Image: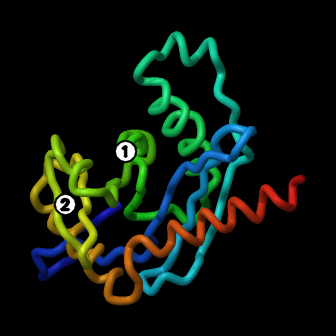
Amino acid sequence: MFEVSENTERLAPVERFGFITVVEVPELGFAGGMLVVSPCGRPIEFHCTPPVAENRTQKILYGQTYRGFLFCDQIASSIFEKSKARPQLLITDRCELLALDKIARTPVVMLCSPEQAENRIAGFDVGGEQVISQIDDAQLLSSVKFACGEFNKSLPLVEPFERIRLAIEEAQAVAR
């Protein structure tokens, strides 16, 4: 979690960034992956799930909230629970995973298109990428923005998502 540093107004630097997403695996369902990296983008830990098939009964019962339940409560929360190197900041590219902040008890932000940025409490730009969140604490949001900017000096924020997708594809190829 972010901690206030002595003698500064900024919060302590982030040492572990978590990039988390869910991808569709054709004919099998959805698989999630989380890559925890250092501030310069080097891997610390990686976890992925086997594909989770959609459940028709749950889909009916959950209605429009089904994807949020599947992606956040079932897939992403199980990944986060396995993590030993807990990220201090989670970055996702799926709006359904913004609610992970309640499970993970760590700030979560999402990289998004300008259309997705509507109806969010807070947003900012990092290296040409739009970042949104539901963080309503100004100091925490400022710290998150600073951390994202510092990470972006080493790598674009979108880059780890490509590594996650490729690693999930590789895991599925090995499993077949």
Measuring from the top left, give residue 127's x and y in whole percent. 26, 79
N-term-proximal mark, 2 vs 1: 1
Question: Which tag is nearer the camera, tag 2 or tag 1?
Answer: 1
Secondary structure at numbered mark 2? helix
Residue 66 relative to residue 107: left or right:
right
Few, some or many residues within 10 Å of mark 1 (<14, 14–19, 20+):
many
Residue 32 relative to residue 116: left or right:
right
- The residue lying at 42 percent from left, 56 percent from top is 92
Q: Amino acid at mark 2?
A: Leu
Measuring from the top left, give residue 41's x and y in whole percent. 49, 82
Quadrant in the picture for residue 30 = top right
- The residue lying at 74 percent from left, 46 percent from top is 50
Q: How is the image coloured?
A: rainbow
- The residue lying at 24 percent from left, 52 percent from top is 133
Measuring from the top left, give residue 97's x and y in whole percent. 42, 44
Compared to residue 135, the image places residue 111 above or below, namely: below
Q: Which residue is mark 1?
A: 95
Compared to residue 166, the image places residue 138 above or below, namely: above
Q: Amino acid at mark 1?
A: Cys
The N terminus - image quarter:
bottom left
Few, some or many residues within 10 Å of mark 2 (<14, 14–19, 20+):
some
Q: Nearer the viewer, residue 24 or 124?
A: 24
Q: Which residue is mark 2?
A: 140
